[in-house]
Image: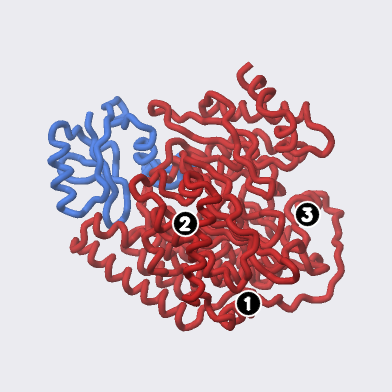
Chain colours: A red, B blue
């Protein structure tokens, strides 16, 4: 049985009631009793967008954790209501691209049977809480961050005060110095830390990507764990009060923090927090204990580290796609959804069913979604790794490319998204084809592609970032270098004039060639860029 | 030519104004000309099609061609999945 939160009666009742409510709203819309202007905010509150080709449903995967039964349901929905596949996103969610309005209530009802929903996956509210895909199994974490993400999920679900914020609001929770969740690029970033033997949170606010990328500054170095909700509430209240509502492009908390200055923002939060102390808003300690109990470590078997690497293909996969587990004899295995020439983040219904089955057999029934659009089996016995790899390989799910050049983050872009200005996926495909033959040589190289300035493809945080723009009706691509979403967080800078769809692939290769010729021992691409600066890359690109 | 397009309320399918109603095939699109505003107002009131908007295009030997790539993608389906969308039905 998966180590994850289980709905209680309150959770299930709320979700079931929302399904019934949306069923009624949809019936009224289909009958013509509601206009689209009236219905649109209602469907968006349930994650139903209208995209280029059809309705798109975004389903929340809380902090990226799924059970086998939930993954099976995602496969069923893909097969029954969509066109046989789903798309895992940079927010650890899944999206379906071909939904019909009449089916949407039934889909939500099916999701509710496995404790899932699409609530707050759109709108100006607190969105799905994201986290480290290795939460609970990472050797470097001070604590499993998921109970605190779950506490925040419960606090933020249907929170009346924060249902109409100036703009959408994203929170990430991690618990290690290594940041695998782009935590500093969230509206609120929380790092669980220990101080003098006590557990608490280092609290960041005002990060984000989009058209104005910002790295979130620290608001408070240490918030005791039993003040986490109160402090979050104080930050949200300050944002809700002072965040701009006159201009949606300046409405995110990052703009407020930037314009106010972190010192003034911190003073406002501190003042609000002081006022809140007598209100006793913190949930009872017993509730946190109840949640923590769901995440108690599962019954690991005694085992020793080590596995047979005599199959060279398996050895390459093991070298790139495995993450050290905190329990001896186990490993966390990343299933790359980035086959060369494929669509980043897409998985067929059959693949999802297989992954659910593999999770049941090899990973204590647990799957994780990563913000890099891959999946993880977090609890694999090392003795089972070879058998697991063989099954993955047979289903096209064993690309050995984690954090390599062909492990590209790409938004849906103009192939699916009504906001996009240019296609992202074909650029990812051509780049993967070009660079895959040399990617082992290139080492850690994170390429991230967005089809518009909203930056769903995280181009600001790519070692190499690509931004698609509309240049008088023609797709054009800007090249950026030097970004990172990790603990060495930085924002990528534009190299210069953009390229067409063929030129951008050549341009990236020019950049990687220069890196190969200039790198010093052990340097990643990012290290070489940081040492050399932009100038030699510009020279190579534009002469 | 002025082309009117939107998404069908029930299915979400991309649809094009064909002079009498809405067609799923871009090839059926007609020049709405000066009638565009009136048609959009009437169709919005009818509540059958969402997010109707007008685009510029040209009539070519292969049929109507929207000026912007976004609408050309809408007219065929994802360029990365030729097995999906209206393009799959045509092949």
Residue A463 at x, y = what percent? 65, 39
The CA distance from mark 2 to mark 3 is: 37 Å
User: Residue drawn at (52%, 26%), measured in percent from left and top?
Assistant: A498
Nearest the eye: B56 or A270:
A270
Q: Residues within 10 Å of mark 1 (few under 14, many from 20)?
A: some
- Circle 2 marks a residue in which chain? A
User: Residue drawn at (15%, 42%), measured in percent from left and top?
Assistant: B39
- Circle 1 marks a residue in which chain? A
Q: Is residue B70 visible?
A: yes
On the image, numbered disc 3 is attached to which residue? A318
A182 left or right of A122 in image: right
Note whether A281 is above or below A80 in the view shown: below
Q: Secondary structure at mark 3?
A: helix
Marks 2 and 3, the one that precedes in the sequence: 2
Note whether A371 is above or below A74 in the view shown: above
Asked if disc 2 and disc 1 are in contact, CB closer than 8 Å, the reply is no
Location of the N terminus of chain A by quadrant is bottom right
Residue B6 at x, y = what percent? 27, 45
On the image, numbered disc 2 is attached to which residue? A169
Nearest the eye: B46 or A356:
B46
On the image, numbered disc 1 is attached to which residue? A292
Q: Residues within 10 Å of mark 2 (few under 14, many from 20)?
A: many
Location of the C terminus of chain A by quadrant is top right
Viewer-side label of 2, 3: 2
The CA distance from mark 3 to mark 1 is: 32 Å
Q: Residues within 10 Å of mark 3 (few under 14, many from 20)?
A: many
Q: Is residue A78 visible?
A: no
Marks 3 and 1, the one that precedes in the sequence: 1
Marks 2 and 1, the one that precedes in the sequence: 2
Residue B34 at x, y = what percent? 13, 32
């Amino acid at each position: 049985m998966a180590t994850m939160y289980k709905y209680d009666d309150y959770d299930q009742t709320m979700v079931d009631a929302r399904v019934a409510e949306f069923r009624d709203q949809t019936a009224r819309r289909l009958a013509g009793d509601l206009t689209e202007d009236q219905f649109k905010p209602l469907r968006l509150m349930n994650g139903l967008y209208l995209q280029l080709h059809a309705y798109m449903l975004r389903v929340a995967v809380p902090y990226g954790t799924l059970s086998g039964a939930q993954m099976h349901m995602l496969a069923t929905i893909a097969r029954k209501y969509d066109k046989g596949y789903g798309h895992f996103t940079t927010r650890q969610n899944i999206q379906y691209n071909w939904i019909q309005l009449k089916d949407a209530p039934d889909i939500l009802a099916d999701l509710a049977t496995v404790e899932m929903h699409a609530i707050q996956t759109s709108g100006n509210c607190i969105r799905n809480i994201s986290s480290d895909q290795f939460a609970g199994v990472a050797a470097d974490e001070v604590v499993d961050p998921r109970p605190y993400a779950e506490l925040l999920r419960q606090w933020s679900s249907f929170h009346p005060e924060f249902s109409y914020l100036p703009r959408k609001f994203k929170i990430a929770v991690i618990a290690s110095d290594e940041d695998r969740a782009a935590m500093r690029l969230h509206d609120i970033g929380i790092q669980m830390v220990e101080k003098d033997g006590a557990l608490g949170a280092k609290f960041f606010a005002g990060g984000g990507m989009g058209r104005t990328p910002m790295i979130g500054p620290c608001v408070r170095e240490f918030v005791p764990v039993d003040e986490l909700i109160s402090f979050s509430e104080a930050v949200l209240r300050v944002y809700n009060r002072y965040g701009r509502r006159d201009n949606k492009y300046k409405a995110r908390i990052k703009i407020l923090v930037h314009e106010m200055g972190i010192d003034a923002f911190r003073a406002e939060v501190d003042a609000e927090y002081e006022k809140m102390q007598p209100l006793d808003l913190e949930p009872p300690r017993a509730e946190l204990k109840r949640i923590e109990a769901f995440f108690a470590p599962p019954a690991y078997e005694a085992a020793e580290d080590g596995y047979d690497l005599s199959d060279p293909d398996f050895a390459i996969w093991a070298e790139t796609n495995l993450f050290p587990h905190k329990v001896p004899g186990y490993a966390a295995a990343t299933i790359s959804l980035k086959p060369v020439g494929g669509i980043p983040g897409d998985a067929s219904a059959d693949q999802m069913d297989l992954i659910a089955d593999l999770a049941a057999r090899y990973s204590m029934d647990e799957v994780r979604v990563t913000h890099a659009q891959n999946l993880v089996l977090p609890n694999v016995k090392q003795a089972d790794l070879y058998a697991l790899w063989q099954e993955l390989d047979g289903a096209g799910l064993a690309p050995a490319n984690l954090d390599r050049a062909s492990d590209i983050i790409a938004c849906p872009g103009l192939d699916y998204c009504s906001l996009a200005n240019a296609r992202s996926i074909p650029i990812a495909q051509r780049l993967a084809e070009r660079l895959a033959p040399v990617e082992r040589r290139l080492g850690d190289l994170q390429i991230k592609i967005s089809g518009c300035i909203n930056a769903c493809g995280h181009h600001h945080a790519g070692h190499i970032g690509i931004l698609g723009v509309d240049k008088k009706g023609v797709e054009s691509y800007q090249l950026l270098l030097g970004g990172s979403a990790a603990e060495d967080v930085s924002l990528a800078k534009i190299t210069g004039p953009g390229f067409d769809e063929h030129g951008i692939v050549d341009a990236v290769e020019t950049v990687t060639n220069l890196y190969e010729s200039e790198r010093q021992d052990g340097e990643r691409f990012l290290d070489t860029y940081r040492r050399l600066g932009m100038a030699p890359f510009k020279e190579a690109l534009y002469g | 030519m002025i082309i009117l397009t939107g998404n069908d309320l029930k299915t979400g399918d991309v649809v094009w104004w064909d002079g009498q109603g809405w067609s799923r095939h871009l090839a059926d699109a007609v020049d709405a000309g000066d009638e565009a505003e009136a048609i959009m107002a009437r169709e919005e009131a009818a509540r059958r099609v969402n997010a109707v908007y007008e685009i510029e295009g040209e009539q070519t030997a292969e049929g109507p061609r929207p000026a912007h790539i976004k609408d050309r993608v809408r007219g065929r389906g994802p360029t990365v999945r030729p097995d999906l969308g209206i393009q799959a039905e045509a092949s």
